[in-house]
Protein backbone atom coordinates (compact mmCIF):
# COMPACT_ATOMS: atom_id res chain seq x y z
CA UNK A 1 0.00 0.00 0.00
CA UNK A 2 1.40 3.39 -0.93
CA UNK A 3 1.98 6.01 1.80
CA UNK A 4 -0.78 8.63 1.76
CA UNK A 5 1.81 11.43 1.66
CA UNK A 6 2.99 10.09 -1.66
CA UNK A 7 -0.42 10.59 -3.30
CA UNK A 8 -0.58 14.35 -3.09
CA UNK A 9 0.58 15.13 -6.62
CA UNK A 10 -0.76 12.00 -8.30
CA UNK A 11 -2.92 12.58 -11.38
CA UNK A 12 -4.99 9.52 -12.30
CA UNK A 13 -5.30 10.71 -15.90
CA UNK A 14 -1.57 11.23 -16.38
CA UNK A 15 -0.17 8.24 -14.54
CA UNK A 16 1.86 7.61 -11.42
CA UNK A 17 5.25 9.27 -11.35
CA UNK A 18 6.32 8.08 -7.90
CA UNK A 19 8.83 5.40 -6.93
CA UNK A 20 5.94 3.20 -5.78
CA UNK A 21 4.21 3.03 -9.20
CA UNK A 22 2.88 2.04 -11.49
CA UNK A 23 0.05 0.27 -9.73
CA UNK A 24 -2.79 -1.70 -11.28
CA UNK A 25 -4.94 0.62 -13.38
CA UNK A 26 -2.25 3.29 -13.78
CA UNK A 27 -0.60 4.12 -17.10
CA UNK A 28 2.92 5.59 -17.04
CA UNK A 29 2.70 6.70 -20.70
CA UNK A 30 -0.41 8.80 -20.09
CA UNK A 31 1.69 12.00 -20.26
CA UNK A 32 2.71 11.21 -23.82
CA UNK A 33 -0.87 10.43 -24.78
CA UNK A 34 -2.08 13.66 -23.17
CA UNK A 35 0.58 15.68 -25.01
CA UNK A 36 -0.37 14.08 -28.32
CA UNK A 37 -3.95 15.16 -27.74
CA UNK A 38 -2.88 18.71 -26.91
CA UNK A 39 -0.57 18.94 -29.95
CA UNK A 40 -3.31 17.79 -32.31
CA UNK A 41 -1.50 14.57 -33.29
CA UNK A 42 -4.43 12.32 -32.35
CA UNK A 43 -7.76 12.06 -34.13
CA UNK A 44 -10.55 13.59 -32.07
CA UNK A 45 -14.28 13.72 -32.56
CA UNK A 46 -14.63 17.37 -31.54
CA UNK A 47 -18.31 16.68 -31.30
CA UNK A 48 -21.74 17.57 -30.10
CA UNK A 49 -23.67 14.74 -28.44
CA UNK A 50 -27.13 14.84 -26.89
CA UNK A 51 -29.06 12.44 -24.67
CA UNK A 52 -32.78 12.76 -23.89
CA UNK A 53 -34.86 10.52 -21.62
CA UNK A 54 -38.55 9.95 -22.28
CA UNK A 55 -41.09 7.70 -20.58
CA UNK A 56 -40.94 5.13 -23.37
CA UNK A 57 -37.31 5.28 -24.44
CA UNK A 58 -34.08 7.20 -24.80
CA UNK A 59 -32.83 9.24 -27.75
CA UNK A 60 -29.11 9.78 -28.27
CA UNK A 61 -27.89 12.01 -31.10
CA UNK A 62 -24.47 13.12 -32.36
CA UNK A 63 -22.90 14.94 -35.26
CA UNK A 64 -20.64 13.04 -37.70
CA UNK A 65 -17.36 15.01 -37.94
CA UNK A 66 -13.88 13.97 -36.75
CA UNK A 67 -10.89 16.30 -36.69
CA UNK A 68 -7.13 15.98 -36.78
CA UNK A 69 -5.66 19.17 -35.43
CA UNK A 70 -7.31 21.90 -37.54
CA UNK A 71 -8.29 19.53 -40.34
CA UNK A 72 -11.56 17.64 -40.80
CA UNK A 73 -10.26 14.07 -40.95
CA UNK A 74 -13.61 12.36 -41.52
CA UNK A 75 -17.12 13.44 -42.48
CA UNK A 76 -18.79 10.13 -41.66
CA UNK A 77 -18.03 9.05 -38.10
CA UNK A 78 -20.59 7.06 -36.13
CA UNK A 79 -20.35 8.51 -32.64
CA UNK A 80 -23.10 6.46 -31.03
CA UNK A 81 -22.86 2.68 -30.64
CA UNK A 82 -24.92 -0.08 -29.11
CA UNK A 83 -23.05 -1.51 -26.09
CA UNK A 84 -25.87 -3.49 -24.45
CA UNK A 85 -29.05 -5.20 -25.69
CA UNK A 86 -31.01 -2.12 -24.56
CA UNK A 87 -28.22 0.42 -24.12
CA UNK A 88 -26.08 2.73 -26.25
CA UNK A 89 -23.13 5.08 -25.73
CA UNK A 90 -22.16 8.34 -27.43
CA UNK A 91 -18.53 9.36 -27.73
CA UNK A 92 -16.72 12.70 -27.53
CA UNK A 93 -12.94 13.05 -27.39
CA UNK A 94 -10.17 10.72 -28.51
CA UNK A 95 -11.36 8.36 -31.27
CA UNK A 96 -8.96 5.54 -30.37
CA UNK A 97 -9.86 5.65 -26.67
CA UNK A 98 -13.58 5.80 -27.44
CA UNK A 99 -13.39 2.81 -29.78
CA UNK A 100 -11.52 0.84 -27.12
CA UNK A 101 -14.06 1.83 -24.47
CA UNK A 102 -16.96 0.67 -26.64
CA UNK A 103 -15.29 -2.68 -27.36
CA UNK A 104 -14.61 -3.18 -23.65
CA UNK A 105 -18.19 -2.40 -22.64
CA UNK A 106 -19.58 -4.76 -25.28
CA UNK A 107 -17.34 -7.55 -24.02
CA UNK A 108 -18.23 -6.92 -20.38
CA UNK A 109 -21.98 -6.88 -20.99
CA UNK A 110 -21.72 -10.14 -22.96
CA UNK A 111 -19.71 -11.74 -20.15
CA UNK A 112 -22.22 -10.55 -17.54
CA UNK A 113 -25.12 -12.08 -19.45
CA UNK A 114 -23.24 -15.36 -20.00
CA UNK A 115 -22.29 -15.68 -16.32
CA UNK A 116 -25.56 -14.54 -14.70
CA UNK A 117 -28.18 -15.36 -17.31
CA UNK A 118 -29.60 -11.82 -17.36
CA UNK A 119 -28.69 -8.44 -18.80
CA UNK A 120 -26.69 -5.90 -16.81
CA UNK A 121 -28.77 -3.07 -15.32
CA UNK A 122 -28.17 0.47 -16.51
CA UNK A 123 -26.95 1.43 -13.02
CA UNK A 124 -24.34 -1.32 -13.17
CA UNK A 125 -23.34 -0.41 -16.72
CA UNK A 126 -22.96 3.27 -15.84
CA UNK A 127 -20.83 2.36 -12.81
CA UNK A 128 -18.64 0.13 -14.97
CA UNK A 129 -18.21 2.91 -17.52
CA UNK A 130 -17.24 5.40 -14.83
CA UNK A 131 -14.75 2.95 -13.31
CA UNK A 132 -13.11 2.35 -16.68
CA UNK A 133 -12.73 6.09 -17.29
CA UNK A 134 -11.45 6.62 -13.75
CA UNK A 135 -8.63 4.15 -14.40
CA UNK A 136 -7.02 6.59 -16.86
CA UNK A 137 -6.88 4.02 -19.67
CA UNK A 138 -9.28 5.93 -21.92
CA UNK A 139 -7.76 9.42 -22.00
CA UNK A 140 -9.82 11.40 -22.83
CA UNK A 141 -13.46 10.41 -23.50
CA UNK A 142 -16.68 12.02 -22.30
CA UNK A 143 -19.64 9.74 -23.10
CA UNK A 144 -23.37 9.77 -22.61
CA UNK A 145 -24.93 6.43 -21.70
CA UNK A 146 -28.59 5.81 -22.41
CA UNK A 147 -30.64 2.70 -21.86
CA UNK A 148 -33.72 0.87 -20.67
CA UNK A 149 -33.95 -1.78 -17.94
CA UNK A 150 -36.50 -3.14 -15.47
CA UNK A 151 -36.47 0.19 -13.61
CA UNK A 152 -37.32 2.25 -16.69
CA UNK A 153 -35.40 4.61 -18.97
CA UNK A 154 -32.08 6.21 -18.03
CA UNK A 155 -29.62 8.82 -19.32
CA UNK A 156 -26.23 9.16 -17.63
CA UNK A 157 -23.71 11.94 -18.14
CA UNK A 158 -20.20 10.59 -17.45
CA UNK A 159 -17.22 12.92 -17.38
CA UNK A 160 -13.68 12.13 -18.50
CA UNK A 161 -12.57 11.37 -14.92
CA UNK A 162 -15.40 8.90 -14.31
CA UNK A 163 -17.86 11.15 -12.49
CA UNK A 164 -21.46 10.13 -13.19
CA UNK A 165 -24.86 11.77 -12.88
CA UNK A 166 -28.28 10.61 -14.05
CA UNK A 167 -30.13 13.28 -16.02
CA UNK A 168 -33.37 13.92 -17.90
CA UNK A 169 -31.28 15.35 -20.73
CA UNK A 170 -27.59 16.10 -21.17
CA UNK A 171 -24.92 17.15 -23.67
CA UNK A 172 -21.19 16.66 -24.19
CA UNK A 173 -18.53 17.87 -26.59
CA UNK A 174 -17.27 21.12 -28.02
CA UNK A 175 -20.72 22.25 -29.19
CA UNK A 176 -22.39 21.57 -25.84
CA UNK A 177 -23.37 25.12 -25.00
CA UNK A 178 -25.25 25.61 -28.26
CA UNK A 179 -27.11 22.31 -27.98
CA UNK A 180 -27.92 22.85 -24.31
CA UNK A 181 -29.65 26.13 -25.08
CA UNK A 182 -32.07 24.32 -27.36
CA UNK A 183 -32.71 21.55 -24.83
CA UNK A 184 -33.39 24.07 -22.06
CA UNK A 185 -36.01 25.70 -24.26
CA UNK A 186 -37.68 22.60 -25.70
CA UNK A 187 -37.36 19.71 -23.23
CA UNK A 188 -40.57 18.62 -21.52
CA UNK A 189 -41.37 15.70 -19.24
CA UNK A 190 -44.15 14.62 -21.60
CA UNK A 191 -41.99 14.29 -24.74
CA UNK A 192 -42.59 11.18 -26.82
CA UNK A 193 -39.70 9.34 -28.47
CA UNK A 194 -40.55 10.97 -31.81
CA UNK A 195 -40.69 14.40 -30.16
CA UNK A 196 -37.31 13.75 -28.54
CA UNK A 197 -35.80 12.86 -31.93
CA UNK A 198 -36.93 16.22 -33.29
CA UNK A 199 -35.63 18.15 -30.26
CA UNK A 200 -32.29 16.30 -30.42
CA UNK A 201 -31.97 17.11 -34.13
CA UNK A 202 -32.61 20.80 -33.46
CA UNK A 203 -30.00 20.76 -30.70
CA UNK A 204 -27.34 19.16 -32.92
CA UNK A 205 -28.23 21.48 -35.82
CA UNK A 206 -27.79 24.51 -33.56
CA UNK A 207 -24.32 23.32 -32.55
CA UNK A 208 -23.31 22.56 -36.14
CA UNK A 209 -24.15 26.14 -37.11
CA UNK A 210 -21.66 27.58 -34.60
CA UNK A 211 -19.12 24.92 -33.57
CA UNK A 212 -16.34 24.27 -36.11
CA UNK A 213 -15.62 20.80 -34.70
CA UNK A 214 -19.20 19.60 -35.24
CA UNK A 215 -20.88 18.92 -38.55
CA UNK A 216 -21.56 16.71 -41.59
CA UNK A 217 -24.88 15.23 -40.48
CA UNK A 218 -26.42 13.46 -37.53
CA UNK A 219 -26.52 9.97 -36.07
CA UNK A 220 -29.56 9.09 -33.95
CA UNK A 221 -29.97 6.10 -31.65
CA UNK A 222 -33.42 5.24 -30.31
CA UNK A 223 -33.27 2.90 -27.31
CA UNK A 224 -36.41 1.13 -26.11
CA UNK A 225 -37.17 -2.11 -24.30
CA UNK A 226 -37.21 -3.72 -27.76
CA UNK A 227 -33.57 -2.83 -28.46
CA UNK A 228 -31.39 -0.18 -30.11
CA UNK A 229 -31.89 1.36 -33.55
CA UNK A 230 -29.17 3.64 -34.97
CA UNK A 231 -29.85 5.73 -38.08
CA UNK A 232 -27.73 8.17 -40.10
CA UNK A 233 -28.98 11.39 -41.67
CA UNK A 234 -26.89 13.76 -43.78
CA UNK A 235 -29.82 16.19 -44.00
CA UNK A 236 -31.32 17.50 -40.77
CA UNK A 237 -34.56 18.09 -42.62
CA UNK A 238 -35.20 14.35 -42.62
CA UNK A 239 -35.74 14.50 -38.86
CA UNK A 240 -37.13 18.02 -38.48
CA UNK A 241 -39.91 17.28 -40.97
CA UNK A 242 -41.12 14.20 -39.04
Image (spheres, helix red, strand yellow):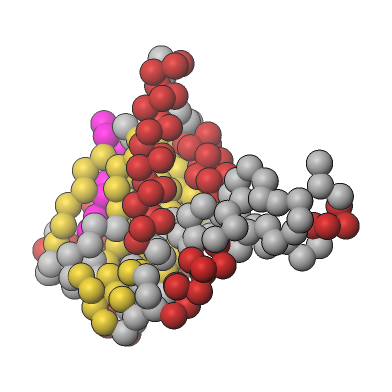
Q: 214 or 202: nearer the eye?
A: 214
Q: 136 or 207: nearer the eye?
A: 136
| Magenta span: chief secondary structure | strand
Q: Is 222 contained in the magenta span?
A: yes
Q: Which x, y percent locates residue 100?
A: 38, 49
Please tell me which residue is depicted at 45% across the width and 43% down the height of the picture.
Answer: 154
Instruction: Say whether residue 57 is visible.
Output: no
Q: In which quarter of the image is the C terminus?
A: bottom left
Q: Which residue lies furthest to the front in this view?
A: 19
Q: In this view, does 134 lie to the left or right of 228?
A: right
Q: Which x, y percent locates residue 234?
A: 12, 67
Q: 103 or 15: nearer the eye?
A: 15
Q: Which x, y percent locates residue 163?
A: 60, 54
Instruction: Say whether residue 46 is visible.
Output: yes
Residue 24: image quadrant is top right
Q: Which x, y percent locates residue 167?
A: 51, 53
Q: Is residue 156 above or below residue 187?
A: above
Q: Quadrant of the N terminus?
A: top right
Please tell me which residue is depicted at 14% across the width and 62% down the height of the picture.
Answer: 233
Q: Is 45 contained in the magenta span?
A: no
Residue 29: image quadrant is bottom right
Q: Is residue 109 left or right of residue 66?
A: right
Which range of residues does the magenta coloring cover? 219-227
Q: Is residue 186 above or below residue 161?
A: below
Amino acid sequence: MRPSSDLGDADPLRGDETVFGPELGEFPNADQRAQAMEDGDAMKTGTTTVGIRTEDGVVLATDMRASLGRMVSSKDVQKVEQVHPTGALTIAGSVSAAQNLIQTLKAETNLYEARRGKDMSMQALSTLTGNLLRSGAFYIVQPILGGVDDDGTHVYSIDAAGGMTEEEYTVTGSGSQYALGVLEQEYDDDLTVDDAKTVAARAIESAVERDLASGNGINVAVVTEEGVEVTKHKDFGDLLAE
